[in-house]
Amino acid sequence: MSMITERPVSNSAGKPPVRKAAEAPAVGRRDVRAVVSAYVTLTKPRIVELLLVTTVPAMMLADGGLPSLWLMAVVLVGGSLAAGAASVINCYIDRDIDQLMRRTKRRPLPAHTVSPRSALIFGLVLATVSVALMVAFTNLLAAGLTLAAIVYYDVVYTLWLKRTTTANTFWGGACGAAPVLIGWAAVTGSLAPAAWALFAVVFFWQMPHFYPLAMKYKDDYARAGIPMLPVVASARRVNTEIIAFAWLTVASSLAVWPLGMSAIYGVPAVVVGAIFVVEAHKLARRVSRGQAVKPMRLFHWSTTYLTILFAAVALDALI
């Protein structure tokens, strides 16, 4: 809907100021930008960005160098659309709980910026286009993994696991790690041990990455009735899992080293892995001592850790 604003204009005759309508097209353009922004927000671009950080290096390692730019472009576009589709459908399914949480109540569906029907259609279109691209320009294994990741995230995780079990983050981790396998499969048409080792890195990484966020928004999840581990378990249990999965993440990263990698990858993996584990232990120590927890410190560092690790994968593959 186009809105018209008015502003006072001086009158040389000394009469009361006349109010002049501002140009409607400018307002219309703002409305269009707002709608486009709302649809983009539904795709959760920051999550898409993080997934792509793991996809490209996996493709480079699978190729032993730099894959064709065409293939990389197809996988990046298809992967972005697939991740966006999964997020949009997730927002559609979770619209009932999103309106109860302070962190999510301003999302387009709870805010009524986009209708549920429009969001669902948008998500399904993105999913269809993404899988079609993968089928047409990569191979059936990569396309099948792409479809499976979307279905698993929205049907298995969002509809079922997220609302019923404290292990939801663990079992949902397969979705976040899937881009590694998809990128590898797009290059080779198969899956090698190194692909599964990188998959394990991202899979285990998601617990020490997400649990600090769930700790910060514990009350939000409790209000929505979502059994995230920090909501229903003791702080000691949460700390134990964060530390255990941080160690498993680093162990998985080191398991990649003998699978065709050099010290170009291995040394950074050891250094950033050590920092990652130390940060996990620091968080647990602050909780046990009753100090200010600051869980987002580990959350942000975990993102930096994954970025550096996969940058090392890419650099090793190139050199």
Image (spheres, rainbow, N blue to C red):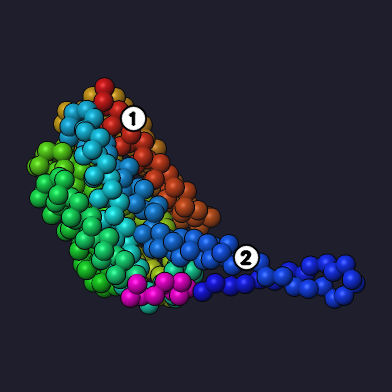
Q: Nearer the viewer, mark 1 or mark 2?
A: 2
Sequence-first disc among 1 and 2: 2
Q: In percent of the image, x 50 and y 53: which residue is there?
A: 294
Helix or strand or loop: what does disc 2 sit on? loop
Magenta stretch mostly in which secondary structure? loop
Q: Inspect the magenta stretch and tell me whether residue 290 lies in it.
A: no
> Gap between marks 1 and 2, in whole Å?
56 Å
Can you tell which mark lies on residue 23?
2
The percent coordinates of residue 225 (x first, y second) are 37, 76
Can you tell which mark lies on residue 268?
1
The percent coordinates of residue 181 (x first, y second) are 18, 46
In this view, 34 is above or below 199: below
The segment highlighted magenta reads 109-118
Quadrant assignment for the C terminus: top left
Q: Inspect the magenta stretch and tell me whether residue 113 lies in it.
A: yes
Furthest-right residue in view? Answer: 14
- In the image, is 253 to the left or to the right of 299? left
- Name the foreground residue: 201 vs 244: 201
Helix or strand or loop: what does disc 1 sit on? helix
The percent coordinates of residue 139 (x first, y second) are 11, 46
The part of the image, by quadrant, that contains residue 221 is bottom left
On the question of residue 245 being in view, the answer is no
Q: In percent of the image, x 31 and y 66: which residue is there?
A: 122
In this view, 181 is above or below 165: above
Amino acid under disc 1: Pro
- Name the foreground residue: 209 vs 112: 112
Contact (Cβ within 8 Å) of mark 1 with mark 2: no
